[in-house]
Image (tube, rainbow, N blue to C red):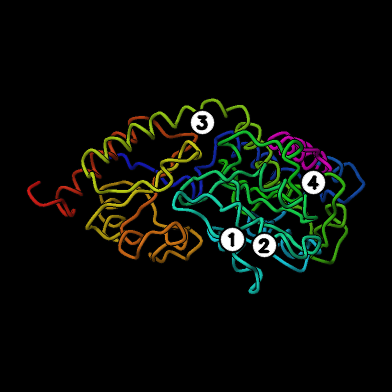
């Protein structure tokens, strides 16, 4: 019987068995964490234990962790609640950042997907103390890592605050919010092998946020609404396991690089986006010359390989990626790219099988140089 191969971890990771156990156990408990009786205190312990695990994942303090319904809400909370009226965002941000402020100014990136620091510096020349800079740590499509330390320094020197969407970086690279001095960091549970529908924003030292969800004093009055206790419990376990597995995650870059070499050897005109700059170890976005993305996705899906094109938050539509176009790709190249992303339960065999399927598809349908 054919075994399907899941290679879409950047969209969502399979839920870890330990997380399922933690969520199930929490669902068997009764209690609102705001109640002061025994049941409420037990629920509160689950929430606070998880808060500590999530703080440890990003090297912050538990009191600075604000639970939300996911990365999208966390991003919205940071961008709307920072108190800053001028918003600068990189041109490769996730839609949950790009669509929050219609007047946000976009910071360009180079062909490798790195933010142009000189352009950011120019934009910070005016009204720095009214500005929030939003730059993701790792891109969801290409995996490219941004120079967050330099970005924070440039911004803080001008009095600006920094929001960093670290949804795709958490659990893949070490994050130290304390050392980086990021003002607002956002992460999501389901990218770590935790449950969907739960995320967090981590505040920088001495900072507060203007609550955007009113009606209760939860989360130290930063986000009203009864906490998702079972989701939070699962999130905490996923955060702990991700921190423990960081070294194993780093090793995935070796199998990724080997796969890319084989694909490029078979299709020399293919392009791996961000190949010449630091990336998270699990992500490849590559073009298949002459074969549209939607064709690749359908054929590979029928053969048992789950990959993607662009952001999973684009409602299933296959369209040219704004990220790849910002990196200088034309419509044709952007329309021939797919993303392969691995994670905690991926194996070398998964990538080997996928590599063979990709090469076979290219040999059947791809565009090759004359005489080849």
Residue drawn at x 65%, y 73% as measured from the top left:
103
- Which numbered disc covers residue 107? 1
In this view, the residue in front, 107 or 194, is 107
Q: Residues within 10 Å of mark 2 (few under 14, many from 20)?
A: some
Asked whether the beta carbons under mark 3 and mark 1 sit within 8 Å of each other, the answer is: no
Q: Residue at x 50, y 42 (%)?
A: 14
Above-or-below relation of 74 to 178: below
Identity of the residue furthest to the bottom in this view: 102
Kindly state the secondary structure of the residue where label 1 is placed.
Answer: strand
- x and y percent of residue 186 in the render? 68, 50
Which residue bears the numbered disc 4?
204
Q: Which residues are magenta?
A: 43-63
Crowd class of label 1 (few under 14; some 14 to 19; many from 20; radius 10 Å): many
Say whether marks 4 and 3 touch (CB < 8 Å): no
Residue closer to the observer: 366 or 25: 366
Badge number at residue 249: 3
> Which residue is more in the foreground, 313 or 204?
204
Element class at badge 3: helix
Please tell me which of labels 4 and 2 falls first in the chain: 2
Residue 47 colored in magenta in the image: yes
- 366 horizontally vs 351: left or right: left
């Amino acid at each position: 019987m054919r075994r399907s191969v899941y290679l879409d971890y950047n969209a969502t990771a399979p839920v870890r068995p330990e997380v399922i156990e933690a969520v199930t156990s929490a669902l068997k408990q009764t209690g609102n964490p705001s109640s002061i009786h025994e049941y409420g205190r037990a629920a509160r312990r689950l929430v606070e234990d998880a808060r500590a695990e999530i703080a440890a994942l990003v090297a912050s303090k538990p009191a600075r962790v604000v639970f939300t319904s996911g990365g999208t809400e966390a991003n919205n909370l940071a961008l709307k609640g920072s108190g800053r009226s001028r918003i600068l965002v990189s041109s490769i941000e996730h839609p949950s950042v790009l669509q929050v402020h219609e007047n946000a100014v976009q910071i360009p990136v180079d062909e490798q997907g790195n933010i142009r620091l000189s352009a950011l510096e120019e934009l910070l020349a005016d009204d720095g103390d009214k500005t929030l800079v939003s730059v993701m740590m790792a891109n969801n499509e290409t995996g490219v890592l941004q120079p967050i330390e330099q970005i924070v320094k440039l911004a803080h020197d001008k009095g600006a605050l920094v929001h960093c969407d670290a949804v795709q970086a958490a659990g893949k690279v070490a994050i130290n919010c304390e050392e980086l001095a990021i003002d607002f960091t956002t992460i999501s549970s389901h990218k770590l092998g935790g449950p969907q529908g739960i995320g967090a924003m981590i505040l920088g030292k001495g900072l507060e946020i203007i609550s955007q969800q009113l009606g209760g004093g939860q989360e130290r009055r930063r986000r009203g609404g009864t906490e998702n206790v079972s989701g939070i419990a699962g999130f905490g376990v996923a955060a702990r396991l991700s921190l423990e597995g960081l070294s194993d995650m780093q090793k995935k870059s070796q199998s990724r690089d080997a796969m890319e070499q084989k694909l490029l050897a078979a299709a020399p005109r293919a392009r791996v986006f961000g190949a010449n700059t630091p990336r998270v170890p699990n992500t490849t976005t590559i073009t298949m010359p002459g074969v549209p993305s939607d064709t690749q996705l359908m054929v590979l899906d029928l053969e048992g390989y789950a990959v993607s094109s662009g952001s999973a938050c684009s409602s299933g539509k296959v369209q040219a990626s704004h990220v790849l176009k910002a990196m200088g790709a034309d419509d044709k190249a952007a329309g021939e790219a797919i993303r392969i992303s691995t994670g905690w339960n991926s194996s070398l065999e998964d990538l080997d099988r996928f590599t063979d399927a990709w090469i076979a598809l290219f040999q059947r349908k791809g565009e090759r140089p004359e005489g080849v």
